Image (tube, rainbow, N blue to C red):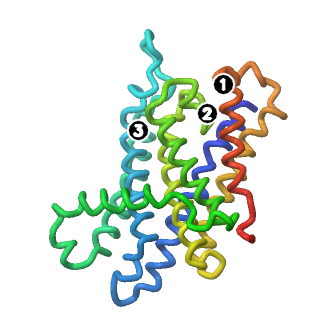
Amino acid sequence: QHQFFARVGGMAAVPLIVGGFGVLACSASRATESWEQLGTPTCRRHNLALMTTGLGGALWTYFAETVTKIPGTGTSHQVYTGAMKWGLMGCYGSGAVLAATVWAKSLPDDVRSNPLSWPGRIADGVSKSLVSLAPANKDDPVNVKYALLATSFLAFTGMQTVCNMPIAVMPSWLSRRISRKFALVTLLGATTSFDLKEAAESGKLLVESNYRTLSKGVKGFGALYFAGRSGVFFDPSFPEHFGVVNQVPGLAVACALMVALTLRSDEK
């Protein structure tokens, strides 16, 4: 049962990935004569986020044995070999290549012809997003909700990337096996939440289907996240097999409370 609930929690990534690719597919179906429809800020951000998620997933799969090595021993928590390893890397890699190709194709002609300007363009876009995290209208609960979620997902990404155990485990509860990899999921969650924050500010959130798709992805993430956490009520191994979580229970509760915002309605 412990492994079952852990897998359910790990599957929280699926709604975000499906939502991201769903928006891009919907936009692509409308772009019958040009790439302009795929050049919107939402599409560009999601292409970059999906490219990063795919590339990071492929690299994590390849180096999993090293990343999850248990200090002082010759064993690792997670090791991929053979067809499983190369199959996963192929899936992640193909998604990254697709997203990167669409992002490049949707650039303005003068920018696309100058690849050396791409890193600067990405850095400018990321910087602009970071300084725009605060809600434009603090009296709008939906605007505040997505601003908090975007900030929280970014904080979770940092915790899982640079912090030591047990802090790195708190956003995912996936122990040492794939807690580092879950940072890619929360990065995608931050991108999605930021897009929804801007949609709430522009009045498009409840109007355009693309944003409804993204919103459903965020809610799906929250539902599976808490389905995985329900193991504390139904898993007979609790609290013995939740040792890492039990070391910092306050932080675990704080992370859960922030994720709970994903389940709030988009109605004011």
- The quarter in which the N terminus is drawn is top right
Mark positioned earlier in the residue sequence (2 or 1): 2
Q: Is residue 224 left or right of residue 134?
A: right
Identified by mark 1, the residue type is Val
- Counting residues from the start of the chain, the first of labels 1 and 3 encountered is 3
Q: Residue furthest top?
A: 72
Q: Residue at x 44, y 79 (%)?
A: 28
Position in image of residue 4 (x %, y %): 71, 37
Q: Nearer the viewer, mark 3 or mark 2?
A: 2
Q: Identify the amino acid type marked 3.
A: Trp
Counting from the top left corner in percent of width and height, residue 143 is at: 63, 65
Name the residue at 41% across, 28% down. 67
The residue labelled by disc 3 is 60
- Label 1 packing within 10 angstroms: few (<14), some (14-19), many (20+): some
- Which residue in the protein does label 1 denote? 248
Q: Which residue is mark 2?
A: 170
Measure the alpha-carbon separation of dots 2 and 1: 8 Å
Q: Which mark is residue 127?
A: none
Locate the C terminus by quadrant: bottom right
* Above or below: residue 253 compared with residue 195: above
| Disc on the earlier residue, 3 or 2 | 3
Foreground label between 1 and 3: 1
State which quadrant residue 40 falls in: bottom left
Q: Give SS at disc 1.
A: loop
Mark 2–mark 1 contact, CB under 8 Å?
yes
Is residue 51 or residue 204 the one in the foreground? 204
**Residue appearing at x 61%, y 43% in the figure:** 10
Residue at the spot x=31%, y=60% of the render? 124
Q: Is residue 4 left or right of residue 179?
A: right
